Image (cartoon, rainbow, N blue to C red):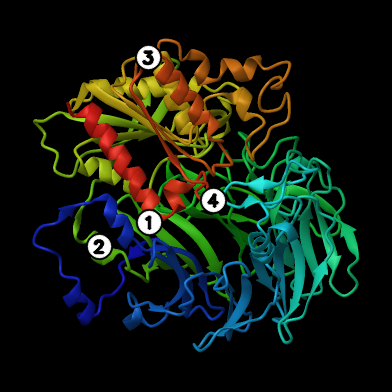
Amino acid sequence: MSAKRAKRQPAARKSAQRPSKRRLITAEDLLQFRWLSDPQISPDGNHVVFVNKTVGDKNAYAQNLWMVSAQDKASWGQPRAFTTGGRDRHPRWSPCGSIIAFISARDKERPQVALIPAAGGEARNLTDFPEGSVRDFKWSPDGTMLAVSFREQDPDWTSEAKKRREESGQTDPPRVLDDWFCRYDGDGYFNAQRYRLHLVDVATGKSRVIETRDNLGYFSYDFSPDSKQLAVTRNRDRLAHVRSWKDEIVRINIATGKITLVRNMPEGPKGNVAWSPDGRFLAYAGRIGMDDSYSTENLELFICDPVKGSPRSLTGREDYCMMAVSIGDTSEAEFTPKFRWAADSRRLYLQIGWHGETHLATVSRKGGKIAFHTRGANAYQLGNLSKDGKRIAIVRGTTTALDEIAVADVATVKRSITQLTNLNGPLLRQLRLSRIKSHWIPTPDGTKVQTWVMMPPDAKASRKYPGILEVHGGPHGQYGIGFFHEFQMLAAQGYIVVFSNPRGSKGYGREHTAAIRGSWGGADWVDIQAVHAFMKEHRQIEKTRIGIMGGSYGGYMTNWAVGHTDEFRAAITDRCVSNLVSKFGNSDYMALPDHYWEGNAWDRPEARWNASPIKYFKGVKTPMLIIHSEGDLRCNIEQGEEVFTALKLQNVPARMVRYPRSTSHGMSRGGPPDMRLHRLAQITEWWARWMKK
């Protein structure tokens, strides 16, 4: 596909004239970003509605729906606000295109599904759910119903219950838990409550629960083309949280509620179920075998018969993973596969991460070779298709451009892409940004590690600069193409930023990812050392002033590095992992014994302990900044506390910054604006203290 620029109008051209001299990016530019996501093209292909997230008043984000024409070339680049509620998301067109349904959280405690005419007007709430959480919904093809995933708040923790306790002087209630799946990072504690599937009548707003007999609450679902059935993935296992290979697919008769199991389905995780437009097939993302959805194994695209089952993989012949997700700080890291059926049911559109890039591709319903339709240093995100299947709404970003909304014309031979918005353009035209250069670094065992170098925007060829090695989280994600504010800010401050995808990363095939399964600190450390050696040999990096930093697993590797070498001038470990034995029982993400890790955490902890960075902290000398959130449910704050205590007891210069319980593991990407700015200021101060003297 070729990309076209959005046509600018004379008025916009006048207000967006390029300044005579661009300035360097700052932390505070975060406050001007527009995060654009979830593009949905109208059934007739003429308009795209999307979510526009900005920093609003009182240190809060404003999230509204915006609309842009995809047909009238005179309107390209001129999107308009469509809702003003400030907490609106998940827009979906009705099948006839006259109505847009969306999730509105104007009443923060009681989000509802609202409807608004596509031509504009006042929105009205369709549902009247009690206090709780609406995850998502789907229209029935006939436009008469919505299937909605809703979870009611625990009665002891509603705002009304809290108010009664405050009035009577009572404390918060205890949590009495029988199931360990009672919390999730970014979602908080929900105790025994689960999402349930509700069927809502569009004409009356009345709803009823469709029983799925699911134990986890994170099911996927889709209507049959005739609107008479729902296909639902479910897990009835008592340990569903860690046994995702027990997932099933069922068909539910909407009129009677009868549940019929899709037969002849092998064990393995199954998600994102989607009925083909002709009704003959179900597609889903999964794998065969006793592994969960987040794994070193490739997640594949399957199709099966809705009655007989007997799935076959469409992507298994090639070494791509449907969950190769790029990690950045200007969009959420969604470890969710994305695919869409073509209108003729003959093929499916996929979003695939490969070598740091994210591209759009198709695969035939019969299988065969995956065809890529985009290329180059871009990150594309898949939206939906128009009813005739000729146009796709997408998001496009690069390392020097924040995400914007575009449309791909897939019916033409050239399969052209047209950018429809340029909402971040006025800010970006003020800035001197850094581009990146890709390198493939050889390691002693013959592996080649893709590595990118980001130079300071005003770097002089005759000068040397301090270098910062950034390590991504996951570990089964990838760095690559996409606007990374933190990287750009550090480069603007005079650092050469280096980031790579060592073994364990997705986007380089199954063997590259599986190389560290149950053995962190092995092949991944070999690769990180090779990248460090490359930095020391780089003609413009001062080899005695190299620092290392990372978040989550990147924090793990930072801890591992300082426990194995004194060569880094300083380090920053963010929302880290330090002790895999203690982490076993205090994370929202759990692993079964003898599964990912050999042994267990109580009487056979050797594999976890030997891979724990804290084991090697005797004699650590590297000054470290420890950043952690008290509300982190993925990597508990005690992981950072262990690092801080070990350093202080050995008289190593260290500082710990604890962010409040209202923040989570993803604070650097979606936390409160003031906390994000504070974090960037701490990073800036730490590097200035240790790297520039």
Residue 334, numbered label = 4
Sequence-wise, the earlier of marks 2 and 3 is 2
Between disc 3 and disc 1, the foreground one is 3
Residue indicated by mark 3: 565
Between disc 1 and disc 4, the foreground one is 4
Q: Quadrant of residue 73?
A: bottom left
Residue 427, numbered label = 2
Sequence-wise, the earlier of marks 1 and 2 is 1
Cα separation between marks 4 and 3? 34 Å
Q: Secondary structure at mark 4?
A: loop
Residue drawn at (23%, 30%) of the image: 689
Residue 251, numbered label = none
Report if residue 267 is visible in the image: yes
| In the rendered image, the vertical position of residue 259 relative to residue 236, given as above or below | below
Task: Name the spot of residue 4 as percent of width and height, x first.
Answer: 32, 66
Q: Secondary structure at mark 1?
A: strand
